[in-house]
Image: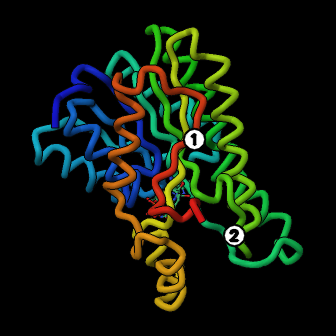
């Protein structure tokens, strides 16, 4: 891998596990200094140790992304530590309870929207303010195939991931002329702790059957797309949504 991100500073939320972990490792391997931000500080530290073991530089930051004050503190910490913010992967998210819309408790609905949607508004708000000060940057928001498709019994997740696509388009329109590119990624089902811990084997087999490629995705397959979108190679790509889904959405 080339050191294309040398001298850059990046944030990955939810960087302690799964897709976020893979994104943090890819960014560090490409030369970026990476703030690995996660609710689970031990998990973030484990990823920072993996980065250091490969000769890279990262730091762990404990955060609940649904807290706007904490998100501002994360961005301030990055700029204080590295003098700038160039790239951000707004990835932290939860699945939420699996049940139909009318059975959702109001608090459950609000919690999923806080973690999966409002958090990304907070992240973009403070990340963009920081990026404007140094002339630009690149942001990737982690949506899902459920950013355009429905999925029974996940109404709050589906609503959040759809809204992320719209917010990404708007930010792309509003900031492209100022050197900030914003894109969203739509992974199919990816074998991460989110899937392995919340879905039984029968459900995982059912999901495999929904992907014409015949398997679930791997975190590094999502990270490869994220890294491309963050990189200068994607200089004309902004305000758009990019699938990595083994043909799930092609059906
Ligand atoms: P994961 O393995 O569960 O990793 C998510 C990480 O985010 C965990 O370390 C988790 O900590 C952390 N986190 C949860 N809530 C947080 C909060 N409020 N503030 C900060 N950190 C928080 O999940 P993943 O599968 O890699 O998913 C990452 C993103 O990809 C999510 O946005 C998800 O919706 C999206 N996505 C996933 C799939 C998939 O099939 N896996 C498909 C499409 C999109 P804890 O472990 O302590 O909860």
Q: Please tell me in which quadrant of the rendered image residue 40 appears.
A: bottom left
Task: Using residue 172 as the reference point, say whether residue 20 is left or right of it.
Answer: left
How far apart in space, not on screen, are marks 1 and 2 (Cα)?
A: 18 Å
Task: Residue at the far right: name it.
Answer: 102
Q: Residues within 10 Å of mark 1 (few under 14, many from 20)?
A: many
| Residue 78 falls left or right of residue 199 | left
Q: Nearer the viewer, residue 3 or 52?
A: 3
Q: Farthest bottom residue?
A: 202
Q: Secondary structure at mark 1?
A: strand
Query: How many numbered marks, from 0 up?
Result: 2
Task: Report helix, strand or loop for mark 2.
Answer: loop
- What residue did someone put label 1 on? 241
- Determine crowd level at label 2: few under 14, some 14-19, many 20+ residues with C-alpha closer than 10 A: few
Relative vertical location of residue 180 with respect to residue 117 in this rendering, above or below: above
Q: Is mark 1 within 8 Å of ligand 1?
A: no
Q: Is residue 149 left or right of residue 239?
A: right
Which residue is disc 2 drawn over? 151
Task: Give the answer, above or below, for where 136 lies relative to 32.
Answer: above
């Amino acid at each position: 891998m080339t050191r294309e991100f040398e001298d850059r500073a990046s944030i990955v939320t939810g960087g302690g596990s799964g897709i976020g972990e893979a994104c943090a490792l890819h960014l560090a391997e490409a030369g970026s200094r990476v703030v690995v931000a996660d609710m689970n500080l031990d998990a973030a530290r484990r990823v920072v140790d993996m980065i250091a073991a490969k000769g890279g530089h990262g730091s762990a930051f404990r955060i609940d992304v649904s807290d706007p004050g904490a998100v501002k503190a994360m961005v301030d910490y990055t700029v204080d530590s590295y003098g700038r913010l160039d790239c951000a992967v707004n990835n932290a998210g939860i699945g939420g309870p699996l049940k139909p819309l009318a059975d959702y408790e109001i608090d459950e609905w609000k919690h999923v929207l806080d973690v999966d949607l409002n958090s990304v508004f907070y992240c973009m708000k403070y990340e963009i303010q920081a990026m404007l000060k140094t002339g630009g940057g690149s942001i990737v928001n982690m949506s899902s195939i459920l950013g355009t498709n429905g999925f029974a019994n996940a109404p709050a997740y589906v609503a959040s991931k759809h809204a992320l696509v719209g917010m990404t388009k708007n930010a792309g329109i509003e900031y492209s002329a100022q050197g900030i590119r914003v894109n969203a990624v739509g992974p199919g089902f990816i074998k991460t702790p989110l899937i392995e811990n919340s879905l039984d084997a029968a459900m995982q087999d059912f999901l495999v059957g929904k992907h014409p490629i015949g398997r679930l995705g791997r975190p590094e397959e999502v990270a490869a797309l994220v890294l491309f979108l963050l990189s200068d190679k994607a200089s004309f790509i902004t305000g758009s949504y990019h699938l990595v889904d083994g043909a799930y959405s092609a059906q």
